[in-house]
Amino acid sequence: MKEKILFVCVNNACHSQMAEGWARYLSGGDRFEFFSAGLERHELDVYAVKVMAEAGVDISSHTPKSLYAMRRLPCNHSAQKTLDTFFASFLKIPSAHGDVHFCRA
């Protein structure tokens, strides 16, 4: 069974979408499944799509999702981009192993 990894940011429009895209591109898809979500759901950032395409990674088919929509995903790990410690105190993403990794903006 593949391990599931969830990338989380505020809007799921840019950073977490790019992280999901890079992870899928670099992993080869054999061992992991990657997902992304945000505290809110905004439209996919057109500049993120353009920059990723220039690097050879297509995220144009990605659909922004809210964290609420992903609440039943049994993820093994999550990586969260936080803007400040305020968000860090509220972002509690349960995972099978309790692994939560924070990345500062």
Image (spheres, grey):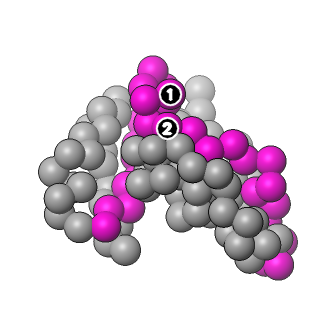
Farthest-out residue, top: 72
Q: Is residue 15 above or below residue 35?
A: below
Q: Is residue 88 above or below residue 47?
A: above
Viewed as shown, does residue 57 lie left or right of 73? right
Whole-percent x and y of residue 98? 26, 38
Name the residue carrying label 1. Answer: 69
Q: Are marks 2 and 1 in contact (CB under 8 Å)?
A: yes
Which residue occupies 76% across, 57% down?
59
What kind of secondary structure does the magenta stretch mostly adopt?
loop
Which residue occupies 34% across, 30% down?
96
Q: Is residue 75 magenta?
A: yes
Whole-percent x and y of residue 30? 70, 43
Residue 62 appearing in the image: yes
Which residue occupies 80% across, 55% down?
60
Residue 98 numbered mark, or none? none
Residue 27 appearing in the image: no
Name the residue carrying label 2. Answer: 66
Whole-percent x and y of residue 42? 57, 49
Q: Residues within 10 Å of mark 2 (few under 14, many from 20)?
A: some
Q: Residues within 10 Å of mark 1 (few under 14, many from 20)?
A: few
| Amino acid type, label 1 | Ala
Whole-percent x and y of residue 47? 71, 72
| Residue 51 picture quarter | bottom right
Viewed as shown, does residue 80 lie left or right of 59? left
What span is in magenta? 54-83
| Amino acid type, label 2 | Ser
Viewed as shown, does residue 87 lie left or right of 57? left
Q: Is residue 88 above or below residue 30?
A: below
Mark 1 residue element: loop
| Residue 20 picture quarter | bottom right
Q: Is residue 102 magenta?
A: no
Quadrant where the image shows the N terminus? top right
